[in-house]
Amino acid sequence: MTSEVAAAAANAARRTAKEMHGIAVSAGLMDKTVKVRLGGLRWEPRVQKWFKQPRFKLVHDPRNSVRQGDVVAITPSWRVSQHVRHVVKHIIAPHGEGIDERPPVPTLEERIAERAEKRAAKDERRAAIKEEQARLREEERAAREARKIQKIERANAQRPSKAQPTTSDDVD
């Protein structure tokens, strides 16, 4: 388990160089997810001019601490859902209420520890389910064996037993 945590920390540390800054354009509509606009320019060769072409990312916000209009730093992280592949690292410039009034953004270590706890709980649940299934399979196997023995005993009881050969003394 600790090796998984260490591997996750190492992978996350490798990705920290890819920190990006953007503005939260949609917050509060999805639970623990915000939409962030990242800057971008596109060169149009026909008119020899740069045009704004922003990119949008869906970003995981573990404690719903980002509000619309906040300037945030995001980093790549493990995939949370189909389209959410980044996480809020910290809030650079808050918009609206102050940072002190919001829940704090968890650090990388806190997120890794929380993920390890969830994984451990999931492993425990799976182990309990497997034990229950094994117990049920064993009970079913024992019940099948019992039915098989009963069937054999019934078949033996219904068969006519071989009669003793009759002799002239037995006949009246």
Image (tube, helix red, strand yellow):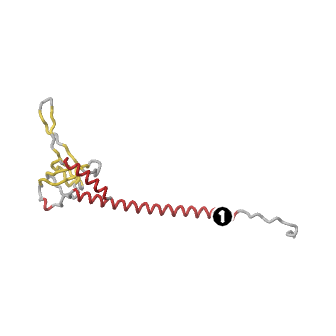
x, y percentage for residue 47?
A: 12, 30
Query: Does residue 165 appear left or right of residue 103 in this picture?
Result: right
Query: Looking at the figure, which quarter contains the C terminus?
Result: bottom right
Residue position marked by numbered label 1 in the rendering: 154
Q: Quadrant of residue 125?
A: bottom left
Q: Secondary structure at mark 1?
A: helix
Query: Neighbour class for label 1 at 10 Å: few (<14), some, many (≥20)?
Result: few
Q: Is residue 48 above or below residue 106?
A: above
Query: Does residue 133 appear left or right of residue 148 in this picture?
Result: left
x, y percentage for residue 58?
A: 23, 49
Residue occupying the point 65% across, 64% down: 153
Give the amino acid at mark 1.
Arg
| Front in this rendered view, residue 109 or 138 | 109
x, y percentage for residue 93?
A: 11, 53
Query: Does residue 96 appear left or right of residue 33 in this picture?
Result: left
Residue occupying the point 16% across, 40% down: 53
Query: Looking at the figure, which quarter contains the N terminus?
Result: bottom left
| Front in this rendered view, residue 63 or 87 | 87
Q: How many marks?
A: 1
x, y percentage for residue 45?
A: 15, 30
Q: Is residue 55 above or below residue 140?
A: above
